[in-house]
Amino acid sequence: MESRKDPARPYVLGHDPLELARLDRQAATIERPTRMLLQAAGMATGWRVLDLGTGLGHVARIAGDIVGPTGAVIGIDPSVDALAVARERAEVAGVRHVSFEEGDVSTWSAGEPFDAIVGRLVLFHLGDPVAAVRQQARNLRHGGRFIAVDFDLGSARTEPVVRLAEEVLGWVEQAFTAAGASPRIGARLGMILRQAGLEQVATFGVQAYLPPQDKAGAALLAGVVRAVAPVIVERGIATAEQLGLDTLEDRIATEFQRADAVMLPPTVVGAWGVVTRV
């Protein structure tokens, strides 16, 4: 999940180099559906966009591609380390219309209204997502759009069933829930936007299907388990021996091959709504 912080709860994922590398891999797997969802929401050339919880700047860069140099994107995040990486990458790429600022999703306020606000894998971590959307909607112009992109872990499975994968998905869901996150929030994004007062709300999800020989599925599962392993062990969800982090990815990949199983990762869900001012 992306990097952000809710002052009411600790961020369950860290910011160490291994976690930042995992975020890069995760971002690569969901870049296409993210781009599809932003375009479906109507984001267009010349727009001014705010990216909430920008982390390493993945979504800010996608939005920057869509709005072009006549537009502008500002990404905010509380992690100084992640922002340093995001700024360096934008500078190396020569992208001057995408910038980054330190800021908290729940409180940050803009001096000039935006055409769109994007939050990918942000509401997942917040204790009161409706309040956060309502707060940030104030930074939109009349007719501006709030676009939320998040996971629905409830849709993740294998076909046919792979017992180890089911067990791993259970560990991950329990760990995020125990830490106060909402791993199935994608299914509720449309409701959250409506409750925050947005209108013309639309939502749909993009589901990937990874064949048995695609090692991305095993890497995805093992990577998330590795990231939340401290919570899993601390909360008694599973022991370190049960996790077997050193061999977990290989064991999952082997089971996928043995069962000739297709992996369905969490659905990437998008929802958007319009701000109307009287």
Image (spheres, helix red, strand yellow):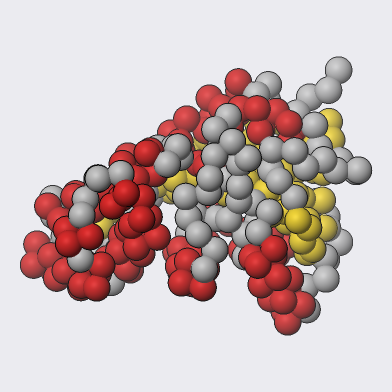
User: What residue do we see at 45% from left, 37% from top?
Assistant: 180
Q: Is residue 79 left or right of residue 137?
A: left
Judging depth in this view, the residue of 164 and 43 nearest the camera is 164
Can residue 64 be seen by looking at this rendering?
yes
Q: Quadrant of the C terminus?
A: top right
Of all residues, the one furthest to the top in this rendering is: 278
Report which quarter residue 183 is drawn in: top left
Q: Is residue 131 left or right of residue 249?
A: right
> In x, y percent, where is residue 122?
57, 45
User: What residue do we see at 70% from left, 28% from top?
Assistant: 134
Q: Against 19, is 115 above or below?
A: above
Q: Against 203, is 64 above or below?
A: below
Can residue 45 be seen by looking at this rendering?
no
User: What residue do we see at 23% from left, 60% from top?
Assistant: 240
Of all residues, the one furthest to the bottom in this rendering is: 92
Could you tell me how many numbered marks the image carries? 0
Of all residues, the one furthest to the right in this rendering is: 111
Judging depth in this view, the residue of 44 and 25 nearest the camera is 25
Report which quarter residue 215 is drawn in: bottom left
Q: Against 266, is 210 above or below?
A: below
User: What residue do we see at 20% from left, 72% from top?
Assistant: 247
Judging depth in this view, the residue of 206 and 258 nearest the camera is 258
Judging depth in this view, the residue of 34 and 247 nearest the camera is 247
Report which quarter residue 153 is drawn in: top left
Q: Is residue 265 left or right of residue 16?
A: left
> In x, y percent, where is residue 98?
78, 64
Q: Against 60, is 201 above or below?
A: above
Q: Is residue 268 left or right of residue 61?
A: left
> In x, y percent, where is residue 212?
20, 67
Of all residues, the one furthest to the front in this rendering is: 234
